Amino acid sequence: MRRYLLAAVAIALLIMPVLTINAGPEQVWVDDLTAGSFDGLVGSGTITLAPNAPPAPAFVGDYPQAGSYLSSEHQFEEVVAAVVIDTDTTLTTGGAVRFDVRGKNPSGTWQMWQEAPRGGRVALERPTSVIQYRMWLLANGESPRARSVTMVAEWSDGVAMLAESQAPTYRIYATREGLVGHRTANGHIIRPYDQFVALPSWRSLSSYRGYEYQVRVTYKGRSKVVPVWDVGPWNTRDDYWSTNRQSWKDLPRGLPEAQAAYYDGYNGGRDERGRRPNLPNGIDIADGTFWDLGIPDNAWVEVTFLWEGYDPGAGSPAATPTPNVTATPLPVTLPPAGSLLVDNRDNSFREMQGVWFDARCGFNGAHRWTKSVANQSQVDNLGVWKAPITNPGFYEVMAYIPACGEPATKNATYVIAHDGSNTKVRVDQEANQNKWYSLGVYYFKGGNEILLDDVTGEEGLSVRYDAMAWLPRSDNTAPNATIIDVKDLGAGRYEVHWNGQDDSTGIASFDVQVQRNGGEWVDWLVTTTELQDTFIIDVNAADAEHTTYGFRTRARDWAGNTGEFPPSAQATSLDTLVIQQP
């Protein structure tokens, strides 16, 4: 076995030793970090992050600043099977360095990137004689500093470069990326009528404005070849077109993980970050390409992965079996039998104000959503369901919470406008996905509404709007009620607290009575909706010091059922908690 010494890179406040190899001059490739290309880096001899370096792409890590150096290509005299990279580096607290390596095929196409851990051996996808590396400087504070990179290339006698086969084609669900003005994972600022795609793996990401990785996208006979300039949708490690997938190795080649999660509940129906995909998409397409292909909306397209082999041309059949795309989405929990329904697609649901998004899942296969805001001054979106009531009466109202999409709010506040009152109910949408969540039983008439806005106290979470159900309820049972306590406030004032429970329609009001020294009961409060009040006595009365007051209560519900007063006092002034006055 022979080894070739490439050349060196160094980084960070901690000095790391350079790997030493006993090799002749012809074995050394010295890269002084000037022959490659820079993005977000500055310096000569020693390179650091530029002051305005952008945040790291998601696949690299959560770093506020990141920059990359793409080396020049290096031609070896022999066919290389594997490489080892080591660094001479000055690292700072919160800083890091990362290396990716790739080889070039005889046809001129690049193999996919592979992450190269410091000092670790990385076997190339296929033996080759041309190698290139990419170095990332990452910082959460002071920038690391890079001076040199050391690469050792190895091969075995008799290894030959393999001939290429036809590039595979798969039928993939495509969505439009849009996001004009945003920065892609390779540093491109998205423009109107842009021409590129995003795939859910960093391994096939082209360099800034580069064309190393391209796909042919075909839709109903139209075909275009465009570069891969972004990473997504959903995942960042799902190279589903590869014969040796980085992740989800039990899935068949050509089947995106998001598609398997959406249709078949794979990985618990979630992506690599725990989100539930709201579409089975395995490719995002920039506006210009989307429009040029004549795609009217999200659609299934044929995608040929051109770095995997030679281009079969437009309209060619799939080179390998097409994955199953006929399965149905995860089952949606059905509403109770006899419910009256209003879906987000019905005329009885309306959107007021704001920016809205579609999600291709939920009751009847779709729902609408918007982003949450922190406070009332930011309110931008309001959804309204009109009650489909022709026969006034009591109904239990239930909101369906779809089980997919961006992380949902824990503080969706529904306002139920029913006969006689408005009631607010808070719902944790993230914890109650794929459920019909009961908002309570109320008396509804035609024209009553349920409202949900985007104010949750959180920023940027999903507020989901889907179907609402009204289930008729009958109520023939009176509610219970009791005096909770009596508090002596001093100066002849007693603060009385009460509450109650109802099994169905809810409590509409209370009656409270009082008696003096165990005598006749007298109405104090009638049909009150309060849960406390202050009872005041005449402290100057001759017998005030020797008088005891008893209290009892009853409740009526919205169906008109009224409970009975208990025969004796539920609490008295002798049982009071004395409140110390300042």
Image (cartoon, rainbow, N blue to C red):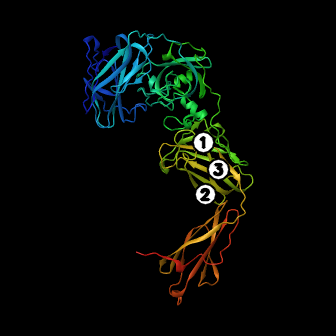
Location of the C terminus by quadrant is: bottom left
Q: In terms of image quadrants, where is residue 184?
A: top left
Amino acid type, mark 1: Pro
Q: Are marks 1 and 2 in contact (CB under 8 Å)?
A: no
Where 168 sits versus 494, above or below? Answer: above
Residue found at the very far right of the displayed protein: 391
Q: Residue at x 45, y 31 (%)?
A: 182
- Which residue shows up at 56% across the image and 41% down it? 369
Q: Is residue 8 left or right of residue 181?
A: left
Residue bearing the label numbered 3: 398
Q: Residue furthest bottom?
A: 542
CA–CA distance between discs 1 and 2? 25 Å
Tag shown at residue 181: none
Tag 2: amino acid: Asn
Q: Residues within 10 Å of mark 1 (few under 14, many from 20)?
A: many
Where is residue 421 drawn, in percent x and y?
Answer: 62, 59
Q: Is residue 113 above or below residue 271?
A: above
Residue at position x 73%, y 58% in the image: 474
Query: Which one is earlier in the sequence, the residue at label 1 or at label 2?
Result: 1
Badge 1 is on which residue?
Answer: 402
Residue bearing mark 2: 422
Where 539 falls versus 393 (above or below)? below
